[in-house]
Structure formats: structure tokens, C-alpha cells
Image (tube, rainbow, N blue to C red):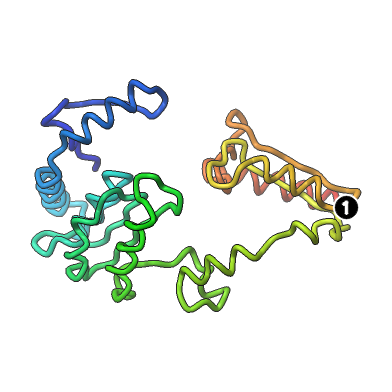
Amino acid sequence: LCPDLFWRQEPGIQITDQTAAEWAKAFSLYKGFDEAKGVEDLQATLKHLRALPACTGKVGAVGYCLGGSLAYAMASNPAASSDGSVGFYPVQIDDYLPYAVNIKKPAMFHIAEKDDFCPPASQQKIKDANRNAPGSVAQSNFQWRWVAGAKDEDEGIEIARKFSLKDVAKNITCPFLVTHAGNDRVVPVENAQKLYDAVGSTNKTIKIFTTEEGGAEHAHVDNRQVGINFAADWLADNM
């Protein structure tokens, strides 16, 4: 269930991130948004969902940007918290950090290192406030910390920075396939071409998936099967 949290300002508003006018509209709505009222709306939403016959009684909260902040607010609200909360790229949640001690149920928050709306100082505050709640708040950069044997996520990131194929790609001589998403917003598509050019194999292929054919988002999340099928067919032909 996706509640209309802007119903007090402009009921039924529909905007994208494709134009400057829509961005301006989004910021205008954000500046006029009453977060306390928004949390009340979400609490009412949880109550409604839990009362539905098809509901097991457990309800989670998921949100992006402002929604990610509201997911944090729901996780840290002792009066009516969600049973699990996930926030993607939450913004300006510093005011909620004193309530981190109230997070008793599973919670995970994804933060982009270069997010202008959640600067490094805020990121550090978020980490520090939740560092002592490993049983409820996930702070793992996927599983990399454990793979690298790092004592924490920050050390894991520093270890990861040392990994590069820059000077060894030329030594790869076996058949080599590089696939990449044409609309990848995590790893620039130019990196795929650089890797392809650097690999020393004489039998190498690069495939950039387009929006039209699918598989154009990072790790082919919009259509994983098309990437899997291409790789399987390529292996069959080249091994």
C-alpha cells in the first residue's frame, strides 16, 4: 500500500524527475511537508493493513529519499513502529538519530557515499548512532566487509579501493565477455569499454544492453534473465 502523503498539499500529485519544473515542484512540496503529520499518516496506514484479513499482522515500511527518512522515523517510533523498515537514500534524518535506541526490529538503510542530500557529516552521524545495534540495523556494504576481513565497513571500503584490473587485465588471455547496462547509474558504462580495451585476449566480446531489449539497469535488475541468457549462449559458443 502506497499512501498519498502529500494529500494535504496537493491530493493525487504525480511527478517524475525528468524536468526542471518537476524538480522544482518536488522541492516545493518537500519544503511544505509536515513530517510529523506524515508519520501519523503512516501509522494509520500500518493500522489499516494489520486489520486486513489477508495480513499476518506484520507490516514493513519501505521508502526512498524523504520516504527513506520516514521509514527511519517509523523504525524508531516506540509507539507504533513497523515490523521491519528499509530506507533507500534517506535525507536529513539527523533529527531522528536520538531515537535510534528505540529501533528493536529489523531495519536497513541504504546510503550513497556521494549523495549531496546526505553529506559525509550526516552519514557519519547515522553510522555512529546505529553502530551499537548490529542485531537490528544492517550496516553492511553487501557482504564485502566480511569477505575482506575488515573490522568495519569503513575499513572494508578502503580495502576495496585497492582492487583494480588496471595493470593485470592485459594478462587475461582466455575468452572474455564484458556485459554492461546501458543505463547503469552505479557503474559508468564507459568503465565497461575501458575494461574491454585493456583485456589482452584476442577472443573478447563486449555487450551493452539497451532499454529497448532490457537489462539496461545496474546488474540487469530490470531483466536479469536477458543477461543470463546472453552469457550462457556466449559461453556455449566460446568454450
Is 228 displayed left or right of 106 in the figure?
right
x and y, in percent, of residue 230 in the image: 71, 44
At 31% from the left edge and 62% from the top edge, which residue is drawn?
Answer: 126
Q: Position of residue 114 (x, y in %)?
A: 45, 49
> Which residue is depicted at the point 21% across and 70% down?
104
Give x and y (percent) for residue 113: 45, 54
The quadrant of the picture occupied by the N terminus is top left
Residue drawn at x 76%, y 42% is 206
Whether residue 100 is situated above or below residue 55 in the rendered picture: below
Total marks in image: 1
Q: Residue 55's image quarter?
A: bottom left
In the shown orientation, is residue 92 left or right of residue 115? Answer: left
Camera-nearest residue between 228 and 112: 112
Q: Position of residue 74 (x, y in %)?
A: 19, 56
Instruction: Residue at 56% x, 45% y: name it.
Output: 218
Q: Which residue is mark 1?
A: 201
Apparent side of residue 88 relative to residue 81 in the rendered image (left or right): right
Q: 230 or 80: nearer the eye?
A: 80
